[in-house]
Amino acid sequence: MVGLLVVATLVPVPGRTPLLSIRVSDSIEHMRGVGTRLKKVGITDLDGLAALNRREVLAIPGIGESSLVTIVAALASTGRSLAADPYASYTCARDSAPARDSELRSYFLCEACRQAFSADAFSGRDPEWISGEQIEGYCSHCNTETVVSLTQWFLCGTCDRVIRSLGRGIASARYVETQWRELLGDLAELELSEVDPVTLQPRGLRSDPNRVATADFVARSANGSARLGLELKSGRSSLPHGGVGSPMAQFQLDTTDCDDIVSAASDLEAPVFLLHAQVIGRAQAPTERFVGVGLWFARPWDMIDNLVDVRRRPRETRDAAYYKTGMFRPFSQFVTYLEDEFDQDEAIMREEGFPLLYSR
Ligand SMILES: [Zn+2]
Ligand SMILES: [Zn+2]
């Protein structure tokens, strides 16, 4: 209320515009308003005020968001605005919103991926900078060996992590297709197809609550009927019996991912298997390529028997199910599994439905 009163007493005068009417500044002791507080820090007119930015105005003792509204309105009434803040947060290209941790993030990208990022995920925003240097190397997104350029956008930490993990995810999907061809090539009656290829999207689009959970891959018989689904997870670590480096102690899977597998299976009316691909980076300086070095599958009926517990992930708000890694078998055994056990599992699913993957 006090602030509005100050604005009401503004009288534009050619030349320097008084911030406050004489009456206001003459009666500081009676008028504990915005103008009084500004005068205390030596700001006596609108020119002085317009030289400040939003952050500097809010730093003045006694000035809060509501006083700021008053000040912005007073400036606007004379066609002015607050100065731009040289230390303002940068706008994250993917979120289209300023973020405190938004900074220049650099990726080696091929031209196709660069254009797709701008057009599909960054609301048409061009990169802040593209290196003039054309480098023979690997695109960090599509993992193709081609001509790439170092490319920068302003992005927040979360979006940067999403982008980096997508490159690994795409390489991982290609790895599954290669392994499938190599190991199951002779079982020609099963045709594998990727259902929901990974693409970079604006934030929020994939978290649509109405989206239908689907498996990442579906294998169909020659007559087109779905026989099984594959849900792919990928990471840097290995599991027992294969891969590179020491295997992880436990396997964690978000409970929402477990729920997605269950609903994908009932939608598909076929078993869905969890796959873990170990995908590591190999340097081809200055770029890096992703290489699949290990692949494992878990039979859904083995999952609950290997459940250790369900708990909140550290520093996150999501629950995860923790499993013993013993539920996984090397993917090289998938052919034998299909030949020896799959028919029986299919029959169990027809009879009893898809199994629970965790319980609290
Ligand atoms: Zn690319
Ligand atoms: Zn972001």
Image (cartoon, helix red, strand yellow):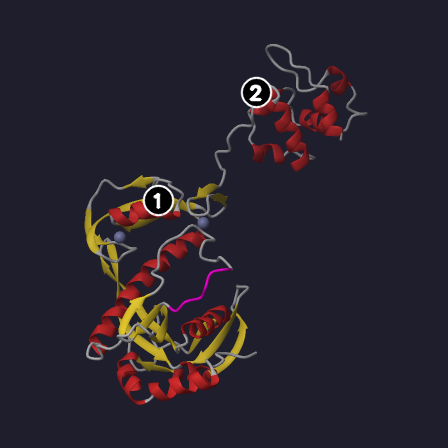
Q: How many residues crowd mark 1 within 10 Å: few (<14), some (14–19), many (20+)?
A: some
* Residue at x 75% of width, y 25% of height: 5
**Element type at marker 2?**
loop
Relative to 128, does residue 185 appear above or below in the rendering? below
Relative to 163, does residue 8 appear above or below in the rendering? above
**Would you say residue 211 sits in the magenta stretch?**
yes
Instruction: Identify the residue under disc 1.
Output: 118
Please report the bounds of the magenta region as a residue range. 210-215
Where's residue 187, x and y in %? 22, 79
Dividing the picture into quadrants, the one containing residue 14 is top right
Which badge, 2 or 1, is on the more N-terminal residue?
Answer: 2
Quadrant the N terminus occupies: top right
Where's residue 293, x and y in %? 26, 72
Report if the CB atoms under discs 2 and 1 are less than 8 Å apart: no
Dividing the picture into quadrants, the one containing residue 333 is bottom left
Q: Which amino acid does label 1 sit on?
A: Ser
Quadrant the C terminus occupies: bottom right
264 sits left or right of 3 in the view: left
334 sits left or right of 359 in the view: left
163 sits left or right of 192 in the view: right
Relative to 176, does residue 22 appear above or below in the rendering? above
Depth check, front residue: 224 or 83: 224
Where's residue 342, x and y in %? 34, 85
* Residue at x 41% of width, y 67% of height: 214
Instruction: Identify the residue under disc 2.
Output: 79
